[in-house]
Image (cartoon, rainbow, N blue to C red):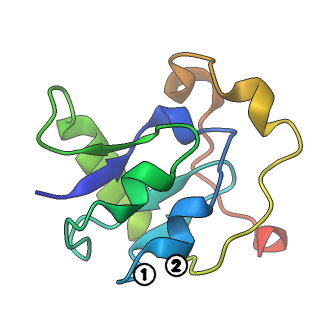
């Protein structure tokens, strides 16, 4: 088992989860975080820290595509190990459903660091 980040993180990108991760398995894109499922140790501490409730166990139904997305972008995006301020409009995006199709950015721009 591993944990994965789902589309609830898109455009919210709270980083509370990053600080509690004991193995630094989070990676940062422009508008979302992902977890490297090969590094995640299933401790679950990140799940309860996420204000967007975007972190889910891969054993839940319909998580296969999220495991794939997390693995793909964990291989492309840099590791993030310290909490950052969320986007100014993060709270406005909290309850927006199905953000993957219309709002996901596969990019990472260096100015985000």
Report which residue position mark 2 lands on: 79
Choose top left, top right, bottom left or bottom right for residue 61: top left
Q: From the viewer's side, name the closer residue of 49 and 77.
A: 49
Circle 2 SS class: loop
Q: From the viewer's side, name the closer residue of 48 and 70.
A: 48
Q: Quadrant of the C terminus?
A: bottom right
Q: CA distance from mark 2 to mark 1?
A: 7 Å
Residue at coordinates 45% horizontally, 57% vertically from top-left? Answer: 34
Q: Position of residue 20 (x, y in %)?
A: 47, 73
Query: How busy is the neighbourhood of tag 2: few (under 14 within 10 Å), some, or many (20 plus)?
Result: some
Q: Nearer the viewer, mark 2 or mark 1?
A: 1
Query: In the figure, 77 relative to 50: above or below?
Result: below
Tell me whether the residue at label 2 lies in contact with that at label 1, contact meaning CB atoms closer than 8 angstroms: yes
Q: Quadrant of the N terminus?
A: bottom left
Choose top left, top right, bottom left or bottom right for residue 3: bottom left
Circle 1 SS class: loop
Left or right: residue 83 versus residue 42 is right
Query: How busy is the neighbourhood of tag 1: few (under 14 within 10 Å), some, or many (20 plus)?
Result: some
Choose top left, top right, bottom left or bottom right for residue 111: bottom right
- Compare marks 2 and 1 and give the one earlier in the sequence: 1
**Residue 34's disc number:** none
Q: Position of residue 9 (x, y in %)?
A: 56, 41
Q: From the viewer's side, name the closer residue of 81 and 113.
A: 81
Query: In the figure, 19 relative to 62: above or below?
Result: below
**Residue 30 is at least partly visible in this image:** yes
Report which residue position mark 1 lands on: 24
Residue at coordinates 75% horizontally, 68% vertically from top-left? Answer: 84
**Residue 77 is at least partly visible in this image:** no
Q: Position of residue 53 (x, y in %)?
A: 47, 37
């Amino acid at each position: 088992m591993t944990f994965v980040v789902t589309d609830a993180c898109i455009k919210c990108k709270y980083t509370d989860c990053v600080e509690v991760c004991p193995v630094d398995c989070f990676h940062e894109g422009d508008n979302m975080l992902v977890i490297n499922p090969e590094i995640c140790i299933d401790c679950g501490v990140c799940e309860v820290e996420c204000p967007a409730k975007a972190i889910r166990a891969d054993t839940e139904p319909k998580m296969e595509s999220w495991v794939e997305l997390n693995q793909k972008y964990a291989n492309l995006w840099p590791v993030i190990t310290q909490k950052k301020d969320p986007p100014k409009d993060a709270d406005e995006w909290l309850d927006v459903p199905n953000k993957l199709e219309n709002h996901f950015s596969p990019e990472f721009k260096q100015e985000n660091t």
